[in-house]
Image: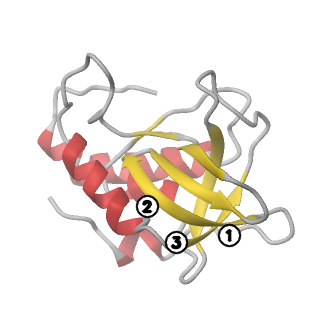
Amino acid sequence: TGPTGQGAAADTVAPPNADGLAGTVVRVVDGDTVEVNLAGGETERVRLLGIDTPETVKPDSPVECYGPEASARAHELLAPGTEVIAQRDLEARDRFGRLLLYLWREADGVFVNEALVAEGFARTLSIEPNVAYRGVLADRQAEARRRGDGLWGTCPTEGDQG
């Protein structure tokens, strides 16, 4: 099942205004981890907040169902050179030192975290206290699951995680 594209983005969350950080994508690591050069700073490894994509590069772990597709979609959404607007939540970093962010593409306002869930490439992963978009992401997951999009139609034994 391919991405649903336009339908999911019609009522998307708008990018932040004053509290947004400008950046440029350097590379995509996997479906929910990217490297971003933030304006005025250095390149940071960023973990997309509120979502979890199937693993493709986790050490000592097999590639999970729909992991390659999720990674490919992240590469499409966040090609190197893509200008983004980033927003933090309450915690700045995870236990691995990755910066925790929500990302929007600057050119078209696509909320990348939401798009990955809405299109069935990611599940929600809500970890307190970083829950700013928990409700929106949960709604998008329920819609994708109901339609059987992406991993929901391909990996039916995945169950609820997050």
Q: Quadrant of the N terminus?
A: bottom left
User: Relative to residue 143, is residue 152 drawn left or right?
Assistant: left
Circle 1/circle 3 CB separation < 8 Å: no
Q: Label 2: which residue?
A: 115
User: Relative to residue 101, is residue 55 drawn left or right?
Assistant: left
Circle 1 — which element?
Answer: loop
Q: On residue 15, which mark appears?
A: 1
Q: Give the amino acid type for the residue marked by disc 3 in the picture.
A: Val
Q: Give the amino acid type for the residue marked by disc 1 in the picture.
A: Pro
Mark 1 vs mark 3, CA separation in Å: 8 Å
Circle 3/circle 2 CB separation < 8 Å: yes
Mark 2 vs mark 1, CA separation in Å: 13 Å
- Upstream in sequence: badge 1 or badge 3: 1
User: Camera-side residue: 41 or 51?
Assistant: 41
Q: Residue at x 62, y 47 (%)?
A: 44
Quadrant assignment, res 128 = top right
Give the x, y percent position of residue 17. 80, 72
Q: Label 3: which residue?
A: 110
Mark 3 vs mark 2, CA separation in Å: 7 Å
Q: Residue furthest front?
A: 42
Q: Give the amino acid type for the residue marked by disc 2 in the picture.
A: Ala
